[in-house]
Amino acid sequence: MLTFALTLVRHGETQFNRDKLLQGQGVDTVLSARGLQQAEAAGRHLRGVRFTNAFVSNLQRARQTAEILLRNNVHSADVELVSDALLRERVILPSASVGSCGGTFRHSARRLSCVLQGFGIAEGLPKEALKNMANAAGQSCRDFTPPGGETTEQVRKRFRKFLKSLFQRMATDHGFPEAGADVAHPAAQDEDGLGQLHAHALVVSHGAYIRVAVRHLVEELQCSLPPGSRVGQVFGACPNTGMCRFVVTLSRGETGPQPHAVHCLFVNRKEHLGGDED
């Protein structure tokens, strides 16, 4: 079996985040000044953590964050950063619609909004608009899908595809130990969950995507949780540059590497922000 660490990190703040505007794939924003500071803080926090593999969403805000993390790292500066569209944020409205359907953009110092005729919600509108639509539909905001948007199940399907490719890449790069070789166990790891693990994948993605990913790991892969964990915390929103870490053990399967066990070490960690996570 092959055991490796998996660390998920959300990108740093963008102006859309700061202004509490909906942000999916339709508008490819960059990090704000505060977001750059958050990424640097996260980079310093992870400075001594050795990553053997790194994967990132192909949206700019995630790419910027990942590059800063690796640049600050004393062990992983030369690790290949693999861009993967499967890690993109949840689609709130198809990007093709953002530039068509009579859409117009209004700019102001505090807001960039997209108004689309015939749609009740679109990327760039205040998050409150999505809450109002969800309430009107009798659904929670987390589970609600706006017209033309991507359902949580569709996001989960993308994450399944990413996991399959990740497992194959880790097996190809690191192989399976010989039969009888010691396999690191979560209980034997240090406080950050790394211990003597020699393989560690860094994945930089987005808030809604990471929330769906964590639910998938817990609900479908039967991931064990840290003692005393509360469901509200585990499935809660990940702050900008928030971190989640898992230990994954793979076994050989007829169709490729298969998850044998998954253990969660922590979720939505934000100590590196020093209280600046709003």
Image (cartoon, rainbow, N blue to C red):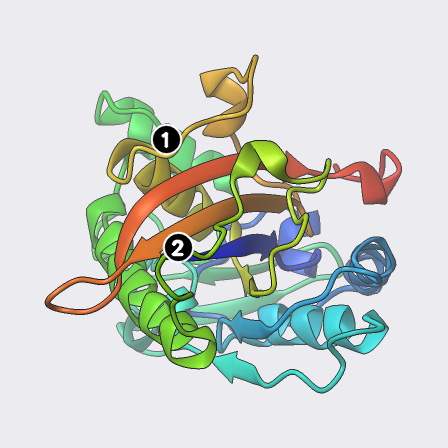
Q: Mark on residue 141? A: 1
Vertical placement of 138 versus 177: above or below?
A: above
Vertical placement of 226 versus 107: above or below?
A: above
Vertical placement of 44 versus 191: above or below?
A: below
Q: What residue occupies the far front of the structure in this picture? A: 180
Q: Is residue 229 left or right of residue 25?
A: right
Q: Residue 130: where, in percent of width, then height?
A: 39, 38
Name which of mark 2 and mark 1 comes first in the sequence: 1
Which residue, given by chain and number where applicable, does mark 2 sit on?
180
**Residue sitting at x 68%, y 48%:** 195
**Residue sitting at x 40%, y 41%:** 262
Q: Residue 185: where, in percent of width, then height?
A: 51, 40
**Residue sitting at x 58%, y 44%:** 244
Number of other residues with Cα within 10 Å of mark 2, as a class: few under 14, some 14 to 19, many 20 or more: few
* Quadrant of the drawing holding the C terminus: top right
The type of residue carrying mark 1 is Cys
Q: Is residue 278 left or right of residue 24?
A: right
* Quadrant of the drawing holding the N terminus: bottom left
Between 277 and 25, the one nearer to me in the picture: 277
Vertical placement of 94 versus 82: above or below?
A: above
Between 169 and 147, the one nearer to me in the picture: 169
Between 243 and 165, the one nearer to me in the picture: 165
Q: Mark on residue 240? A: none
What SS does tag 2 mark? loop
The type of residue carrying mark 2 is Gly
Q: Residue 21: where, in percent of width, then height?
A: 56, 50
What SS does tag 1 mark? loop
Q: State yes or no: discs 2 and 1 in contact (Cβ < 8 Å).
A: no
Q: CA distance from mark 2 to mark 1?
A: 49 Å
Number of other residues with Cα within 10 Å of mark 1, as a class: few under 14, some 14 to 19, many 20 or more: some
Q: Residue 116: where, in percent of width, then height?
A: 34, 62
Picture quadrant of residue 103: bottom left
